[in-house]
Image (spheres, rainbow, N blue to C red):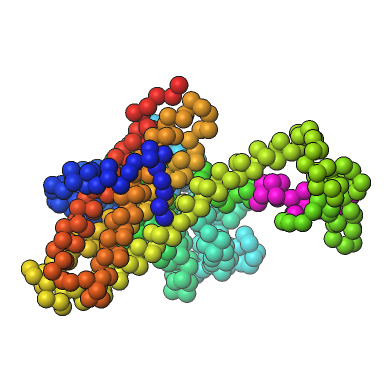
């Protein structure tokens, strides 16, 4: 997709810029993308490694971190690990907050979490009645036989079958089982993980695994510096080292081992240089049904009789509503037939001067608003499609085109690794498509007031320059390379093609760095007047 910039810059100007950038060190371009990830953000900073500032954790590593926190709290507070686990769930895994409140007022924490110092119901030897099914059990014999009566710290007795049904239902209902309380309605004693394991072991291993899964996921989801990778079926989590990154609203891109890249703060796809709040508004707008309602208002008029929306796509102004209504009316004034504006005399229509009604002015305003939204949305969606196509082209270049080129007698280029510059060009294209896509969301939210005209002009100029450079790179990487793959161009010219592609890759990267930097700074080069 090619877009003219508002500056009206010519191709000769761009050529001179290309000549100035010929000597750009190709090592700078190696910082754009490491590890072969086609979605990683190359504009995050010079010399910054994609993995710098965060680490990727497997589920086993997350589980170990979780157990370390539980063991640490258990030791410091002198309580069991099971009780420490329940307390940490209650405090959303905020270890320091738990310790502070515990040493400030231990009784208050115990009461809120349901950790009792001593039972409120004492068992008596002999017959014990289950509080749910009301069956009697011999308490002493059952204890020796392995336990049929179980109770939380409160001491309220319930049989194993009733406990099993209660706990299994809670686990099947979702993560709420992590904060399970005693079945006794008047009791808030905690049902910790040791009791859950003892009740469900041997016969309900599936529920135990689900409980462990909820426990593990809660540790990540409540952790301020840890988030799951949002890619389907990915079991990795990302942990950032800098706590200041959390909740600051700025874009911080991370890449998972599964090749998925996303913004740390909003967990959406990478969207540099657009802020997370703008991305959220744009996504919600694209899903909002108000655009459909707006289209109906702009492109239809209600039948004066039955109020059904009617679209006029051609023909005269004599309208007839579809059955069963069948009402005849004038499209212009919605009045009955016989009005001047509905005359079949064309001259009368041209000479009729009608005052614009309030509803018509509102219709025109909505139409302009809808056209403006469509302008940005179509280009946003086109660049998304172009990026997907570029990803496919990258895979094809790697598996087909480079293999064919390596088999040809090209001087000094005989190995597959010698054609890495082609891969770098496609990675740059994919990267830039992602950036240019989100610049259209940025442009949509630039205010329409006159005082923002200079910012809008600068934005369109930088965007146009970057898009023009991207299109030249795309054409060179796709069209000109195919000529060599299919022997349409002499191999003697391949070194010139190689130099041109490397130069265009560097120049395009420079243009996009300028664009990203300017947008991240709020186009501060110009002031609103």
Q: Depth check: 77 or 354 in front? A: 354
Q: Depth check: 49 or 378 in front? A: 378
Q: Residue pushed farthest top?
A: 529
Residue 251 lies within the magenta run: no
Q: Depth check: 216 or 439 in front? A: 439
Residue 385 visible to an observer of this rendering: yes
The location of residue 441, given as percent across then percent down, is: 47, 44
Q: Residue pushed farthest left?
A: 412
Residue 311 lies within the magenta run: yes
The residue depicted at 46 percent of the width and 40 percent of the height is: 443
The residue depicted at 44 percent of the width and 24 percent of the height is: 528
The location of residue 65, given as percent across then percent down, is: 29, 53
Residue 114 visible to an observer of this rendering: no
The location of residue 492, given as percent across then percent down, is: 13, 69
Q: How many marks?
A: 0
Left or right for 113, reference 354: left
Magenta part of the chain: 292-312
Q: Depth check: 150 or 420 in front? A: 420
Left or right for 528, reference 96: right
The location of residue 297, given as percent across then percent down, is: 71, 46
**Could you tell me which quadrant the N terminus lies in?**
bottom left
The residue depicted at 15 percent of the width and 71 percent of the height is: 491
| 364 up-or-down from 130: above or below | above
Q: Residue pushed farthest front?
A: 347
**Could you tell me which quadrant the C terminus lies in?**
top left
The residue depicted at 33 percent of the width and 67 percent of the height is: 393
């Amino acid at each position: 997709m090619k877009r003219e910039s508002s500056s009206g810059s010519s191709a000769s100007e761009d050529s001179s810029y290309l000549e100035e950038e010929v000597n750009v060190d190709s090592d700078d371009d190696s910082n754009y993308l490491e590890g072969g990830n086609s979605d990683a953000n190359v504009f995050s900073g010079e010399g910054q490694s994609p993995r710098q500032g965060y680490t990727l954790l497997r589920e086993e590593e997350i589980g170990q971190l979780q157990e370390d926190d539980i063991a640490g709290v258990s030791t410091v507070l002198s309580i069991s690990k099971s009780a420490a686990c329940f307390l940490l769930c209650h405090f959303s895994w905020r270890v320091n907050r738990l310790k502070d409140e515990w040493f400030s007022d231990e009784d208050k924490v115990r009461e809120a979490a349901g950790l009792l110092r001593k039972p409120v119901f004492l068992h008596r030897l002999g017959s014990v009645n289950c509080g749910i099914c009301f069956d009697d059990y011999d308490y002493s014999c059952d204890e020796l036989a392995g336990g049929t009566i179980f109770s939380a710290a409160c001491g309220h007795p319930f049989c194993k079958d009733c406990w099993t049904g209660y706990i299994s239902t809670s686990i099947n209902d979702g993560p709420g089982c992590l904060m399970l309380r005693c079945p006794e309605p008047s009791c808030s004693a905690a049902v910790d993980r040791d009791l859950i394991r003892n009740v469900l072991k041997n016969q309900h291993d599936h529920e135990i695994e689900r409980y462990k899964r909820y426990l593990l996921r809660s540790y990540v989801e409540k952790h301020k510096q840890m988030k799951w990778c949002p890619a389907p079926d990915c079991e990795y989590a990302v942990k950032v080292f800098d706590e200041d990154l959390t909740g600051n609203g700025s874009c911080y891109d991370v890449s998972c081992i599964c090749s998925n890249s996303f913004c740390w703060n909003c967990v959406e796809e990478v969207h540099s240089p657009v802020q997370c709040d703008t991305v959220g508004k744009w996504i919600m707008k694209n899903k909002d049904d108000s655009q459909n309602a707006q289209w109906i208002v702009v492109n239809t008029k209600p039948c004066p009789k039955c109020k059904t929306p009617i679209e006029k796509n051609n023909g005269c102004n004599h309208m007839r509503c579809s059955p069963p209504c069948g009402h005849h009316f004038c499209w212009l004034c919605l009045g009955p037939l016989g009005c001047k504006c509905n005359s079949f005399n064309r001259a009368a229509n041209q000479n009729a001067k009608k005052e614009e009604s309030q509803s018509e002015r509102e219709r025109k305003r909505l139409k302009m608003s809808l056209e403006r939204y469509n302008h940005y949305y179509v280009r946003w969606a086109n660049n998304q499609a172009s990026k997907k196509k570029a990803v496919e082209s990258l895979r094809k270049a790697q598996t087909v085109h480079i293999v064919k080129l390596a088999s040809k007698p090209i001087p000094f280029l005989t190995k597959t690794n010698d054609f890495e510059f082609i891969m770098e060009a496609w990675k740059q294209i994919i990267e830039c498509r992602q950036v240019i896509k989100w610049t259209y969301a940025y442009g949509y939210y630039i205010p329409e007031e006159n005082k923002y005209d200079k910012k809008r002009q600068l934005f369109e100029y930088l965007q146009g320059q970057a898009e023009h450079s991207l299109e030249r790179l795309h054409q060179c990487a796709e069209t000109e390379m195919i000529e060599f793959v299919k022997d349409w161009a002499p191999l003697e010219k391949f070194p010139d093609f190689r130099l041109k592609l490397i130069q265009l890759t560097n120049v395009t990267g420079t243009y996009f760095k300028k664009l990203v930097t300017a947008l991240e700074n709020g186009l501060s080069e110009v002031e609103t007047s």
